[in-house]
Image (cartoon, helix red, strand yellow):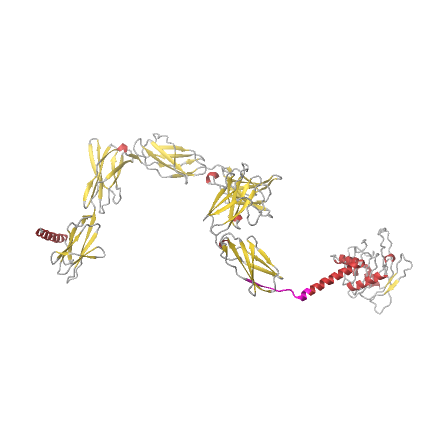
Amino acid sequence: MARMSQTWTIFTVVTGLALQLCIGETYPEKSCAIWSSHGPVVQRGTSFKVYCTFNCKCKGSMYSDHPPTPQNHNEVNSTTIYFNVANITKNTTYSCHCKCPSALDPCGLDISAGYLLERPTNISCIYKVKDNESGVVSCTWKRGRDTFLWNSSELCVRTVSKGHADTRCTVSSRGTDFPYASLTVTSSVQMIFVWVQAQNPLGSQVSVPVTYNLSDIAMPTSPALGQPECSSRECIVRVELPVKAQHLEIQYRTETQTWTSSPDTGVQMSSVQVRSISSLEPYMLYHFRARSKFSSGFWSLWSANISSWTQEEAPAKELDVWYAEPAADSKSLRVYWKELNISAARGKILEYNVSVYSPNSGLVFVNPEPISADARDYSIPFCTDCEVTVWARNSKGPSPPARIKIHHTKAKSTQFEPHQEVQVTAGNHSVTISWRKHDTAPLHSAYVLEWYPEGYKLEELRWVKLGRNENHAVVTGIKSNECYEGAVYVLNNENSVSRIRFSTSESAPDVGPRVEETVKGNKVKVTWTEIPRDQRGGCVTNYTIYLENSSGRQWSYTIPASERMHTITDLSSDFYSLWMTASTAKGEGKPCQKVKFFIQQETQLSLLLVSSVVALIALLLVCVYQSSALKHRLWVYLQCVMLDDVPDPANSKWAQQCTQEKGKMNLQLLLSNSSVTEEEEEPILVDVEELPKQSSDICTLTLSPQTSRSPESAPAILAYPLTTYIKSFSQDSDSSDHTQTSLDTDTTVGYISSHGPENMEEESQEEEEEEFVGMLGFFPSHNIFMEPLEFGGKLTLSAVKIDCSDIFQNT
C-alpha cells in the first residue's frame, strides 16, 4: 500500500512538472513551480495537496494567504515539498520561497473554492407586444444558492409556428438572484417552450422546460398621455394606444393624495382614446397616468405622469379670524387671520378686505386700499362691541365673510391668576392646556385658546378655536427655556377670559436685569429692563434687589415679575452698592453688575434757612390778614403787575404839557359817583402853577379843584422832587389805546394827587398805609376817588409803566 502511495506521489510530481513546461515557464524566471492535486478550482469542504518543486538546491518553505503565513510542509525529495489542505472553506493563495544563488522570483497559486450549481427554478415569462408584427419574450428565474464562483446562464426559447420549430438561446445577465433575458418572436407564434442552462467551473445544470401560450402572457406597450384640458371640476385626458387593447385604466391624484382610478368604460376601436375625469377639486394640481390590457394577459406598465391645474372658484370657507386685545388706552387693535388651505381657497388669493360695523352708528371703517395677499394681520380703529368682518378674494370672487365681535376685556390680575379652572401640563416641546367645560353654555358658544412668547404678542400670536364640547388642547412647537403667555376665552354671552403663563424645560436665568438708579435726598429710585428673551430660562417669577452699605450690611427686596421700578426710602448717609437677580421656578439666576451711589443727608443750616423763610412768609401773611387796607392794596397791586401790557404814565398828555409849558395846567378829574354816568360827570379842574426853585427842571403843581364837596378845602401848592409819582387820569388824552411814547430822559415830571373830600381815611389808617407803602413801594389804589393817592419811592416815569385802566371800576 505504501508502495502504491509513493508511486502516486511521483506520478503527481511528474505531471506537475510537465504542466509547468506546457505553460511555458522556464526555470531561470522562477525559483520554483507550484500546483494543486485538484486543480485551481475546488469544491468547498474538499481536502487536497499543494506541491512545490524548486529549481535550485536550497531549503524551501511554503506559505498561505496575505500576508504570507508559514505552513508545516512535507518533503517528497530534495527539490519537492507539499502541504496537505484539509476541508477548504474559502479562496486561498499559496506560495513557495527558496534562496537560490541567483535572484529568482518566488512562485504562487490561487485556489478558488465554491459549490456546484443548483438547477434553475421559477421561470416566469412575459410577452411584450410592441406592435402588430412582433414582440419580445422576457423571462426571469431563480438561480439557487450562491456558488462563490463565476457562473453563466442562457435562456433558450423554442418556437413552433405552422409546423416549423426554431430554438434560440441568449446569454442572461449575471450577478443577481433573478437573472433576466429576452428574445424577440413574431406575432405568428402562438406557443413557446422555455428553459435555462447554467454552468460554472465545477459543472452545469438545466432547468425543467416551461410551455406558454403567448396570449396568456401578452402585455401591451404603455400608453402615451396628452396634456389634459381642465375646468374647475373636470379634466379631459387624451390617451394614445400603440397597440389596440380592450381595457384602459386612468388614475389621478394630488401631491398629497393616493392614486384614484376612474371608471373603466371600455376601449373603442380607435387607437386614440378621450376620457373625462370628473369630481375634481378647484385650483388643484392633479397628476394623471394610464395603462392598457388585452382581453387576456397582463396590464401594461404605467405611462409617464402628466400634470395639470384645475381652474379657480371663489373661496368656499371663511377665514379663521382672531384679534389682539388692545391696551386700556389704545385707540386701535390688530386683527389676525390664518391663510386658507389650498382646498378652501380654491384659487390664488389676491387680496384681503376688512370692515368694522357698529350697532349704534353703522359702518365705521373699511380698509381704504386692498390688503396684500401676503398679509396676515391688519390694524383697525378700536370700537367697543363692534363687529369686524374679514374676507379673502381670488380671481373668481370673495370668500364667505368671517365675523368676530370685539370686546375690550381688562386683565383682572397681572399675576395671571385665572378666574376659572385652567390647568397647564408641560412636556418637552408641547403643553396640554385643559379647562372646566361650561355645561350650560349656549349651543353657539365656543372656546379660543391663544398663546405667544412673553412680550411678543403682536409679532407671534397663535390661536386655535374649539367647540363648546372641547375642554383641552395640545400646543406644540414650544421652545425650551422660553416663557409663554396666553389666555382661554369663552365666547358666549359673558365672554370671560382666563390668563395663563407657561414654559418647558426651565432653568435659572443666565444673567440679571440691567439696573439704573436715581438718587434723590435719602431715597433711591431703581429701574430695570427685562432680561433678553434667550437668557431668561423660562418664566420670571420675581426680581430681587440687594442693597449693601459700606460696613457690609445687606438688605434684600423681593419685587413681582410684572414690576419695572422700585423706590427704597429712609436711607442714611453712606456709600451703597446695589445689584439685582431674577428668579424662575428653577431658582435664582446670576446677579447683574453692581452699581454704586452715595446718600448725603441735608445739613442743619439748610433746614434752619428753610424754616426761617417759611416763618417770615407766615408772619407777613398774618400782618396782611390783620389789615383790610393792606389786603386791599396788595390785591390791587397783584392785579396790576399781572397785566401783560402796562402803559407808561410819562406818555400822558398831562405829563407832556407839564414839561413843555412849565406853567399852570388844568386836570379834569372825574367824580367817583356810581349814580352818574361819565357824560354827566363834570370835570374837576386843577390849577398847576410853577413855583420858583433852584432848578428849572422841577415842575411845581398847584391843585385847585373847581368843584369840591368840601368848601373848606383850600388849594394845595406842593413841590416835589424829580422822581415823585402820582396816579394821573386825563380825559384830554387822545390815546385810547394807551400808546406808549418814550420821553426825553432829561425831562423830569412831578405829580400831585387830588382827593375826594368824602373819601379821606382816618389819620391812624393813613399813617399805617404810608408806612406800608414806604416799605413795599407804590401800590395804586383801585378807585382814585375812594382812597387817597399816596406818593413815595424814587421811581421815574420812564422807568415804570403802570396800567390802571380799570381804576374807575367799583371794587
Q: Quadrant of the C terminus?
A: bottom right
Front-most of residues 94 and 22: 94
Specify whether 265 is left or right of 420.
Answer: left
Q: Quadrant of residue 364?
A: top right
Measured as percent of width and height from the top left, residue 617 is found at 73, 61
The reply to whether residue 802 is visible in this rendering is no
Query: Which quarter of the figure has residue 566?
Result: bottom right
Query: x, y (%) of residue 76?
Result: 12, 56
Asked if residue 570 can be seen in this view, the reply is yes
Give the residue furthest to the bottom: 694
Q: Quadrant of residue 706?
A: bottom right
232 left or right of 52 in image: right
Q: Position of residue 334 (x, y in %)?
A: 55, 45
Q: How many marks?
A: 0
State the extent of the magenta-drawn residues as a range. Answer: 595-607
In the displayed structure, does residue 104 sit left or right of residue 538? left
- At a point 68% along the width and 66% down the height, the residue shown is 605
Rendered view: 644 above or below 698: above
**Magenta span includes 21:** no
Q: Is residue 684 depicted above or below 137 in this figure?
A: below
Residue extending farthest right: 711
For the residue pair 101 and 739, the one nearer the viewer reads as: 101
Nearer to us in this view, 442 or 810: 442
Q: Is residue 83 left or right of residue 340?
A: left
Q: Is residue 637 above or below residue 308?
A: below
Where residue 141 sits in the image (x, y, percent)?
A: 25, 40
Along the line of sight, the residue nearer the viewer: 753 or 599: 599
